[in-house]
Amino acid sequence: MKWTQWLEEQKTVATILINSLEQSRLGHAYLFTGQKGTGKREVARHLARSFFCRNKNGIEPCGTCRDCRRIDSGNHPDVVVIRPDGRSIKKQQIADLIKAFSYRGVESERKFFIVEQVDLMTAQAANSLLKFMEEPDGQTVCVLITENVHAVLETIVSRCQVLTFKPLPPEKMKRRLIGEGVAPAMAATVTALTADYEEAKALAGDEWFAKARSVVINYMEELFAQPQRAMMTMYEQCATHFTDSNRLHIGLDLMLIWFRDVLSLQTGRPEAVVFTDRLERLNAIADMIFMERTASGLAAVLAAKRRLNANGHPLSVLEQLALRLEEGAVSHV
Amino acid sequence: MNGRIIFHIDMNSFYASVEAVHHPEWRGKPLAIAGKVEERRGIVVTASYEARAKGVKAPMPVWEARRRCPELIVKTPDFELYREASRQLFSLLKTYTPLVEKVSIDEGYMDATELARRVHPLRLAEDIQKRLLDELELPSSIGIAPNKFLAKMASDMKKPLGITVLRKRDVPKKLWPLPIADMHGVGAKTAEKLTAIGIRTIGDLAAADKAQIAALLGQYGEMLHERANGRDARPVDPEAEAVFKSISQSTTLPEDIVSEEEARRVFQRLAVRLSERLKKKRSVAYQAAITIRYANWQTTSHGKTVHQPLQSPQELAAIAVRLFAEHWDGRPIRLLGISVQSLEDAARATKQLDLFTYQTDAKEEPLLEAIQRLEAKYGAPVVQKGVARGQAAFKKAQADGARTPPPSPRPKQSRHEHSESEAEERPDSENESHA
Amino acid sequence: MALATSSIAGESGLLMKLTVYRDALAENVNHVMKAVSPRTTIPILTGIKLEATPEGLTLTGSDSDVSIQAFIPLEEDGVQKIEIHQPGSIVLIARYFADIVKKLPNDQVDIEVDSRFVTRIRSGQAEFSLNGLDAEEYPRLPVIRADNVVPIRKDLLKQVIRQTVYAVSTSETRPVLTGANWAIKNGRLTCVATDSHRLAKRVVAVDVDPAVEYKNVVIPGKSLNELGKILDDNGNDWVDIAITSNQILFKTDNIQFFSRLLEGNYPETDGLIPRDAKTEIILNTKEFLQAIDRASLLAREERNNVVKLKTFEAEKRVEIISQSPEIGRVYESVPVIDHSGEEMRISFSSKYMMDALTRIDAEEIKVTFTGAMKPFLIRPLDDDNILMLILPIRTN
């Protein structure tokens, strides 16, 4: 994405950075805060591209030169990225970072540092980082990234220019996904599941997830069209696809979306439907069953999620849910 | 050295016993102290006798300990607690005589020669053991012998809560049959070497040719040979514990502080007081630590060993501030403290000067030169006199102490009260307290 | 936008094609492997870069701190080493490439790279196919202009390294002191290293335009030690040095050694070296060193390896004493060739003294004291270009 696009996505942040770049007055230390998926990492990388690209159009990096390409591939020797290895930033990583601070650049005097999830740093690590941030020289830029600014040492926050990234509105996220070639119905589905753009994009491209979506839709439709066969479908398709707790959570989330879609149609809000590719069948079912039935279906799925959270066995959770849904379906046909 | 009576007091599974004091519900149950309980790799540091009975011993991985004893209670070590118990333990011992030498956190020697003139050594040992158990709730084993080595071997012979007398004449019967590896001072390596030349028991060593042992193990071997024969002339040296001694200065803050700058000022103030006390003791320190107590009473401690001795307020404040900068996690602070350890006689301390700061030290050079001139003129003793007299006075005080009759059992000490010998741990002003 | 060169394939559809003698290749791969580290956070640095030009083949290995380039010319001493059929470049995973090259069966090796970076290595009946990486991803090393180099004799450079680098700091508390500070002015190269407890300084004349000036070139001690190791005693006698704003380059024969420089300003040390003298003694280096060495046997590291030195003017000798209450005492008397000024009593680290004496390369030395709490200097009797400084130990 270009700076002009970031200006639309993250107006405040992009405005400040664009102005600094235009006036060649980039700060030494930035702290990017904001929810997951709001573009903090991408903006940090884009800033690095603008910092190194020798083929810029104004402040916009070309994206194709050696510097830009190596920033993308992780091969730029003067762009140092520290990413937590597991639950914390390891001592060795901090030692590497400090070493990189104390050496001049490989290709020029310019160096760019990105520290992700800086809140996971130990106080000791953060304080040693601080020591180097206190005496910056003109050629070094350090971007610290966190989703949890309150967990970052106050002494660090106070030495950085803090830039807060706004959460991405769902409608915008959906449009962005569609813009990247995701089918509209799939874009709507993943947007309903997560507010994190990166996660959404990954889900949209995931084969297992695509299958999960069709398995759930197929099962739900069958539940109301041919309830006597639904239990079989559950065993054959749902149980074999949602094999562990994490997977079943996604399956249950998809069932929730399905019931919500029915409810949306029953309450006269067709624009809220997520599974737009199944609109015809959803409409038929919405006409066929009572709204109470839809609500109790939702309740059954939510109850299943709770059981799953309480360490219920995935298969038994699924079986119990199927029984409850089937009773309701049969009695209302 | 004839006719000495030396006690070796050895606490029984000390860490576990201290934990049981603080967790009465754990008494009589198998308990193990282990690092990193949450991790499978944790190792048992010490185990209560109940746990040992089930086959749990140190050093054993926690998973194995749990396998042998599924009902095992495993606790992470709380060294602050153990140090505090150790302080109480030694101040109790010193109520009998100042001739107490701390060997480690949980064992020490006592020269009871003088005391034994009025109390039978066995009664004395029973009294000590009973008071340790009554007042501190800590079990101990005591060895009574004519020297340190035999006392140490004796205290090992009956545990827990044993009292063992090992007279010179008991040596052939009680000491010599023991395997050589059980001898205090013989490690695995030494034992291996000795076994290789056919020495399997302490008796074998005692009977061996001293020159042969010396050829095998050097001077150390000669010493072991002496000890195997029940000879050990080392005096009980109360000063030996100096290395373990720590002086600390801390302050509870009138209001929680939240900035490095405020903390720096507090440390500077504490450093001035600490430095005065170090100077008064003619000591320098090679270890320093800071204590931070947060507003939620969580207390952390961070230390550092240094190569150059610490004594001046500047040096103490600098290291404290550095430790603080490295370890403070940004939360409001209720108490700050500095402590120093690894104390040494200042006269023996050396300091490697630094190119970028030597000028401050060089300022003292004229004084040093004056001393050197005096030394040249009158010989070394003149300038050493101050120190020498200090030591003489100390020796005299010891002798005086030894002549005083043992005090009658004191009223039970509360955990927060401190005996005279720990004056330096005491709060020195209204808003200061010990950590 | 410029097209990336590696995407330009030759008429054959190949990115690069050459034939090289195995031994020349193996030898040079071996040189550049010294800079490759298995522990790198930059993926491309797991590889060796091969760049074929009409002049020959350049190999590069790097751990980003130190980079080594080796060049195989078309021919050397009239013997053909390599034939370039199609100029181009590729990065090959160092571990595999180095092992393969060593074990190839035939004297000749054919290497060709297709447009998808797949690299075929043929020798006799053996044929390897390795997945290569885009050479455009590899770090760009500074390109040096020939008119900008400082030539220095190789043996002199080795001596400079040996006489100074030992004194760099090993502690990260002040990173700039982990390097040696080089400066060039008035045709003289000055090298200084200090860990703040001792300092070593060496000045050598270099053959450059007196107007050439460099300062605050701080080279990591680690790099200089590496360089010292690869400077062999044969081959060309000269090394060309080139300095850029971020790297320094040492060029010898067909090998180029690059090191990143350290960030930050090296502290000013000239003002800290005493100029006046209170006591000056002249000693035989070997005698003095041996006496210190013996005295150090009883010096303890926890006590800063302290030994005490007393000078006696009339008796023309120095006493060296070391004692520790736990171990014992040693006493040495060493004759001095000359003693001028006041008698001096001073304590210092025997280790630092030995470090200096073993590197000073002079039969007789001059030791200059200005006070028991001030740095003292050790210099060869008649050579002001070498200076070893030691800070004393304060005893009470």
Image (cartoon, coloured by chain):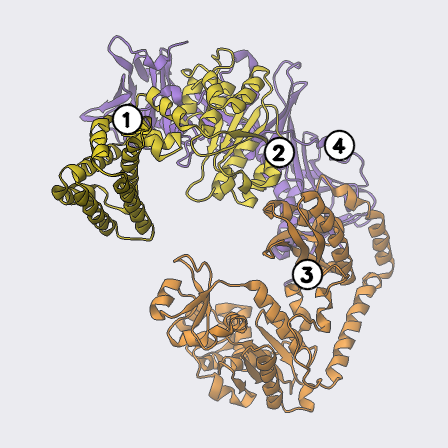
Chain colours: A yellow, B orange, C purple
The quarter of the picture where residue B139 lies is: bottom right
Residue for badge 3:
B343
Taking the image as shown, residue B205 lies to the left or right of residue C305, namely left
Work out how far the residue at label 4 is from the one at label 3, CA to CA, in angstroms.
Answer: 36 Å
Q: Is residue B233 visible?
A: yes
Task: Give me the residue at 42% from left, 60% from top.
Answer: B42
- Is disc 3 placed on a helix, strand or loop? strand
Pointer 3 with pointer 1, Cβ within 8 A: no
Q: Chain of mark 4?
A: C
- Mark 4 or 3: the one toward you: 3
Q: Is residue C70 visible?
A: no
Residue C36: percent from left, percent from top: 41, 31
Instruction: Please say if A290 is above or below B72.
Output: above
Pointer 2 with pointer 3, Cβ within 8 A: no
Amino acid at circle 4: Gly
Task: Give me the residue at 51% from left, 22% from top.
Answer: A11
Instruction: Please say if B172 is above or below C170.
Output: below
Q: Residue B33 or A19: which is nearer the viewer? A: A19
Q: Are marks 4 and 2 on the same chain?
A: no
Residue A261: percent from left, percent from top: 29, 33
Work out how far the residue at label 2 is from the one at label 3, CA to CA, in angstroms.
Answer: 39 Å
Work out how far the residue at label 3 is from the one at label 1, CA to CA, in angstroms.
Answer: 74 Å
Pointer 2 with pointer 1, Cβ within 8 A: no
Residue for badge 4:
C271
- Is disc 4 placed on a helix, strand or loop? helix
Residue for badge 1:
A185
Work out how far the residue at label 4 is from the one at label 2, CA to CA, in angstroms.
Answer: 34 Å
